[in-house]
Image (spheres, helix red, strand yellow):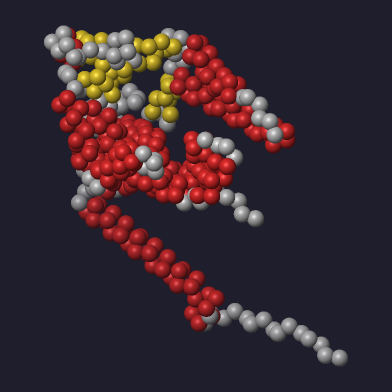
Amino acid sequence: MTIVTDPPKESFRLGMLIYDSRYRSLTIQAVALIGFMLLAAWLISNAAQNLAALGKPIGFDYLADPAGYDINQRLIEYTSRSTHLRAAFVGLLNTLLVAVLGCALATVLGVIIGVLRLSRNWIVSRLMAIYVEAFRNVPVLLWIVFFMAVLIETLPSPRAFRGDDPTASMLLNDTVAITNRGVYIPEPLFTRSLGDISVFGAFGISIDLLVLLAVLAAGLWAAHRVAVRADAIQEATGDRPTTWWQRLLLIVGPVLVTLIALGFHLGYSELKGFNFQGGIHLRNSLIALWLALSLYTAAFIAEIVRSGILAVSHGQTEAAYALGLSPNRTMNLVILPQAMRVIIPPLISQYLNLTKNSSLAIAVGYMDITGTLGGITMNQTGRELESVLLLMLVYLAISLSISAVMNWYNNRVKLVER
């Protein structure tokens, strides 16, 4: 009888870290990581010693000093006596405002233009091609300056609304004024306001806004549950109940009740002296930056959408037509849902590019975080290293947040393979 035994396992030796292919790659990566960390530590230590020798030790206490400058466009209360930290927060909110508005408008325009580029109408497809090529091949900074110049030179001044210019008149029942200094729109006000809440002892956030956001989030969740229940009924019976009015009521109803409870009303702009007073003032710098970034990024998104649609097999379209679906229904129900799996990954890069391109806002005087923390604050305090590091961390956090949200959505829509 022959007894088969397993060969004895080879014991681990230090030489295997270099000569054994199973461990060599890990050894090289570990050595490279240690070397990189040592280099980074040396650079930081050397910079700290040099700054200390110049009488500028690294520290962030300057953020508590009064800023001493004004910010023309802001979403929260701010004065020149506020701290540099609050000025940086105001700039951050301005950056996020442009990024959110820009991504939303660029997505809508990009999808529409991308679909129209595939239109069978020769004129429509050629016009969309001209738009894409024009915006893609001109630097975005030039588009920002161009839109700013158009807004300043073509729109009437506030003084013209006194009757000097017959073409200057307020819109929407005298509630909106479009001037060369910006757009004035009604301001939401509350007669029974709940006040503000202090965050970290420095940032005041409106409780009314938090309540409205909470009510809206609850309504969206309830509407989502109704849609899930309708999907389950359709899966079980083949018939889908009509639920759009229920979901609309769950979203809009609680918000309207909350607005009435808070005494919601609008405050309008009035021409006083040489300018309008009251309401919300959307400055030309914000509008020019928003339009330029949106239209510029929409050109790239249009090409992404077009390539995503072309990536879907033409047999899917023929099958939809064979089932009696119209071209519009085929695009909405068959083509775009499959194309989204190809569109989402490059779309993330365009959102990141738009957010980072918003740092060009200083060219038209829009005070984003680059203009506040990385501009005036850095020049006034002489804290170049600290300000730049904070600025890099802020943009890194914003970019990682956008990537995390879009990657989560990408995992939701991707194909699940067996």
Visible residue check, residue 165: yes
* Left or right placement of residue 57 versus residue 308 in this view: left
How many numbered marks have been drawn onto this rendered protein structure? 0
| Quarter that holds the C terminus | bottom right
Q: Residue at the location (24% across, 47% down)?
A: 137
Q: Position of residue 407 (x, y in %)?
A: 49, 47
| Quarter that holds the N terminus | bottom right
* Left or right placement of residue 120 versus residue 322 in this view: left
Q: Where is residue 183 in the image (x, y as percent from the top left)?
A: 26, 21
Visible residue check, residue 88: no
Q: Is residue 36 above or below residue 234?
A: below
- Extreme right residue here? 1
Displayed quadrant of residue 234 = top right
Q: Position of residue 249 (x, y in %)?
A: 57, 19
* Left or right placement of residue 259 versus residue 174 in this view: right
**Front residue (pair 218, 377):** 218
- Extreme left residue here? 164
Q: Residue at the location (40% across, 25% down)?
A: 204
- Extreme bottom residue here? 1
Q: Residue at the location (36% across, 39% down)?
A: 121
**Front residue (pair 79, 232):** 232
Q: Residue at the location (49% across, 10% down)?
A: 260
Q: Where is residue 233 in the image (x, y as percent from the top left)?
A: 70, 32
